[in-house]
């Protein structure tokens, strides 16, 4: 069992460097299956979701070389048309990109239904709608998605998504890259990682235009070739450190960011009284006075990201006045509020709305990380709180944050990672 122990209420000062974007990496790595040749990928975050995907690709026959902690070479030329190991696939939501990648490469995919963070029903009907539109036959049998292309191959088509879905947009792009003709994705998601996946595929010879708008055109090509690509910085990791400075107080330079991607988060923090200074590839965050209340509603990009909702809620818990958070992407993403209330926050949740009465101080206690971003919120709350916070189930946090302990320690936090052997943990629990 691994826990984080935080002694809070210490202002944050210094510089933090942001890693490559998780949600771009988890799309780009499966997409390397489409490439005959070696892909050299830089700025790959060393996080457990990425390690899992690399393990899956390795077991499928990819040749993977780690040139440095964040630079990887992958050659999928000799990958077999095989079923990715179910016990690995089910541990990560992004394994759904294997469906598009295997379908595109082999004309056939059999992938276990994906796992990942649990915040309500997370259907993949829009992914399937896209694959069917380009000619695949898709069945759900025995916990697997089985997709089969017609004998004469996938055929480009027009797909109008019923909901704006990051995963469906990326998966359909991956599936359509090697199809005959042109695929048009309407009502596409516009997140930075969608543009990053398109840029990666184009660097390997694909012909994708319009990524970053709601209409993406994928002109099918016969083959993709090897090449080099560097993944963009992680918008949500950057936003998490910005929210930490806002909640805890201090003055931190957040480096290796694309400030444009942070617009919505920067604007909200400014509204709450945080000083944000933008540079070409960095943002300085300064908070000296108490935060002001604000409201936030999660929206697809360029709106406020649902993946920043728990972190901003911690800031609001410490702001003067009453703030309202409306979650419009997921059905249940407020489970962490009960943990914050145990730390002294005053949050009332009614289905998709949280009403947050700001308090002057949070108090450390034992809490759980319910999912990746809820876990990040617990870390921020622990850093801001008086006393000691112990966070359990931090494996969720480690799915998406590279070297979080080291990065926070370098900016003045008192945070430790402790591993407790299972037998000792059971004895303590008993
Ligand atoms: C991705 C991100 C996740 C983020 C989310 C929203 C990855 C690996 N994960 O998840 O961190 O929280 O975007 O920014 O990139 N939906 C359907 N049918 C579908 C697909 C989605 O109804 O086929 C619904 C979902 O239930 C949800 C909404 O659409 O309500 C958005 O989901 P989507 O953008 O697809 O999220 P993910 O790709 O799963």
Image (tube, helix red, strand yellow):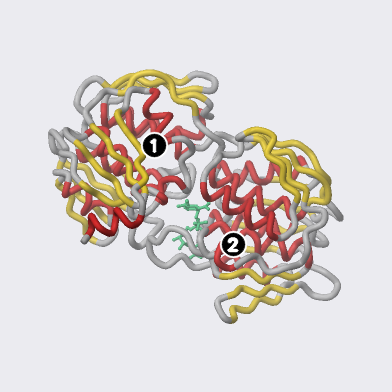
Judging from the image, what secondary structure is the residue with disc 2 in? helix
Question: Residue 298 location in percent, x, y?
Answer: 38, 49
Question: Residue 212 location in percent, x, y?
Answer: 60, 43
- The residue tagged 1 is 240
The C terminus is located in which quarter?
A: bottom left
Residue depicted at x 40% and y 61%: 118
Question: Residue 273 location in percent, x, y?
Answer: 27, 26
* Disc 1: CA contacts within 10 A as few (<14), some (14-19) or many (>=20): many
**Disc number for residue 96:** 2
Residue depicted at x 79% and y 51%: 35
Question: Residue 331 location in percent, x, y?
Answer: 35, 62
**Foreground pick, 71 / 417:** 417
Q: Earlier in the sequence, mark 1 or mark 2?
A: 2
Residue depicted at x 34% and y 19%: 13
Q: In this view, does 177 lie to the left or right of 121?
A: right
Judging from the image, what secondary structure is the residue with disc 1 in? helix
Residue depicted at x 33% and y 45%: 3
Q: Is residue 356 left or right of residue 53?
A: left
Q: In this view, does 181 lie above or below 237?
A: below
**Disc number for residue 266:** none
Residue 73's image quarter?
top right
């Amino acid at each position: 069992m691994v826990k984080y122990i935080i002694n809070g209420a210490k202002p944050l000062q210094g510089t933090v460097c942001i890693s490559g974007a998780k949600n771009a990496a988890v799309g780009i790595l499966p997409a390397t299956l489409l490439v005959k040749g070696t892909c050299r990928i830089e700025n790959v975050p060393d996080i457990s979701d990425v390690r899992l995907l690399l393990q899956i690709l390795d077991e499928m026959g990819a040749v993977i070389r780690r040139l440095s902690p964040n630079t990887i070479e992958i050659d999928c030329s000799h990958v077999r048309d095989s079923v990715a190991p179910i016990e690995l696939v089910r541990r990560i939501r992004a394994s759904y990109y294997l469906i598009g990648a295997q379908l595109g490469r082999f004309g056939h995919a059999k992938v276990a239904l994906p796992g990942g963070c649990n915040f309500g029903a997370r259907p993949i009907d829009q992914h399937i709608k896209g694959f069917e539109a380009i000619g695949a036959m898709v069945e759900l049998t025995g916990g697997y998605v089985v997709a089969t292309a017609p004998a004469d191959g996938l055929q480009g088509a027009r797909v109008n998504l019923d909901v704006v879905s990051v995963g469906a947009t990326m998966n359909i792009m991956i599936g359509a890259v090697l199809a005959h003709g042109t695929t048009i994705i309407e009502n596409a998601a516009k997140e930075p990682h969608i543009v990053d996946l398109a840029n990666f595929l184009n660097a390997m010879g694909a012909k994708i235009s319009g990524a970053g708008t709601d209409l993406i055109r994928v002109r099918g090509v016969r083959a993709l070739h090897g090449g080099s690509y560097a993944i963009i910085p992680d918008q949500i990791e950057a936003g998490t450190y910005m929210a930490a400075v806002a909640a805890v107080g201090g003055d931190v330079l957040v480096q290796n960011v694309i400030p444009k991607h942070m617009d919505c988060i920067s604007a909200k923090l400014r509204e709450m009284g945080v000083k944000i200074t933008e540079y070409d590839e960095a943002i300085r965050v300064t908070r000296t006075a108490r935060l002001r209340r604000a409201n936030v509603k999660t929206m697809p990009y360029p709106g406020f990201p649902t993946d920043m909702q728990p972190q901003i809620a911690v800031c609001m818990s410490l702001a003067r006045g009453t703030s309202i958070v409306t979650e419009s992407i997921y059905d249940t993403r407020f489970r962490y509020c009960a943990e914050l209330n145990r730390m002294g926050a005053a949050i009332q949740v009614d289905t998709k709305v949280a009403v947050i009465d700001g308090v002057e101080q949070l108090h450390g206690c034992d809490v759980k990380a319910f999912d990746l971003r809820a876990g990040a919120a617990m870390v921020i709350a622990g850093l801001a709180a008086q006393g000691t916070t112990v966070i359990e189930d931090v494996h969720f946090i480690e799915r998406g944050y590279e070297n979080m302990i080291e990065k926070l320690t370098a900016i003045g936090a008192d945070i430790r990672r402790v591993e407790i052997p299972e037998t000792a943990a059971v004895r303590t629990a008993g």
